[in-house]
Image (cartoon, helix red, strand yellow):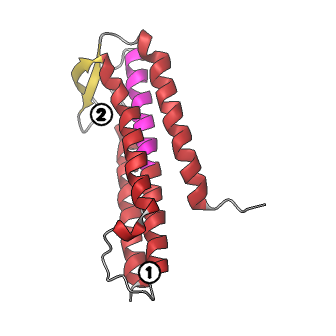
Amino acid sequence: MKKLTFNKFISLLSPVLIIINFGVVLYYFPSLPEHIHSHFNFLGRADDKANRFVIFLFPVLSLIIYFSLGYIIRKPERMNFPVRVTEEYRKELYSVGITMTNIIRFLLVSLFLFLSGAVVYSEMKGVNQINISIVYLFIIFILLTLFAGIKKMYDAGS
C-alpha cells in the first residue's frame, strides 16, 4: 500500500473543505436575510451589508484559488524562487516550493470555509461580530509558511 504523504493528505483535504463550504452556503442560503454582513473591521465587527448572494464568493474564491495554485504545483518550473535554480538543487527547490504552495492553498481554502461559517453564524444568531482572532491566526500561519519556505529555499540553494 502506498504511503499517504503530508502533501498528498492536504491535497486531498482541500477539495473536501471546498465541498463542505459549498454545502454550508447552499444549506443556509434560503434562511439568510436579503442583506447580510459583508465586511468586518479589524476588531471583527460588521460594518457593511450586501446582498446575500455575496456569501457564494467564499466557496467560489476557494475553488479559484485551489485550481490556480494547483496549476502552479503541477508546474513548479513556473514558480519564482528566491535563489537561482540549478540542476544540482532543482529537485529540492521544487519540492519545497510545492509543499509551501500546497500548505498555503490549504490554509486559504480553510480560511474561506471559516469565513463562510462565521458569516452564516453571525446572521443566524443575529450578532454583528465574528471571531477575528481566528482570521489573524490564519494570516500568521500563511506568513510563517511563506517565510519558512523561503528560508528552506535559501538553505537548499546554497
Name the spot of residue 77 as percent of width and height, x first: 38, 70
Q: Label 1 neighbourhood size at 10 Å, few (<14), some (14-19), many (20+)?
A: some
Considering depth in this image, is 60 or 150 the residue closer to the camera?
A: 60
Amino acid identity at mark 2: Gly
Considering depth in this image, is 45 or 4 the residue closer to the camera?
A: 4
Instruction: Read off the magenta span.
Output: 107-124
Residue 113 is a magenta residue = yes
Q: Is residue 17 above or below residue 67?
A: above
Considering depth in this image, is 47 or 94 the residue closer to the camera?
A: 94
Name the spot of residue 103 as percent of width and height, x first: 47, 57
Q: Is residue 67 above or below residue 19?
A: below
**Would residue 141 be visible to someone looking at this image?**
no
Please identify the quarter of the rendering in which residue 55 is found. top left
Amino acid identity at mark 1: Arg
Q: Is residue 119 above or below residue 10?
A: above
Q: Which residue is mark 2?
A: 44
- Of marks 1 and 2, which one's residue comes earlier in the chain? 2
Residue 116 is a magenta residue = yes
Q: Nearer the viewer, mark 1 or mark 2?
A: 1
Q: Marks 1 and 2, how far apart in space?
A: 43 Å
Name the spot of residue 105 as percent of width and height, x first: 43, 52
Q: Which residue is mark 1?
A: 90
Q: What secondary structure is marked by label 2?
A: loop
Q: Quadrant of the C terminus?
A: bottom left
> Which residue is located at x 56 percent, y 60 percent?
7
Q: Label 2 neighbourhood size at 10 Å, few (<14), some (14-19), many (20+)?
A: some
- Majority secondary structure of magenta residues: helix
Say the numbered circle drawn on residue 153. none
In the picture as drawn, the residue positioned furthest to the left comes out as: 48
**Would residue 86 be visible to someone looking at this image?**
yes
Please identify the quarter of the rendering in which residue 40 is found. top left
Q: What secondary structure is marked by label 1?
A: helix
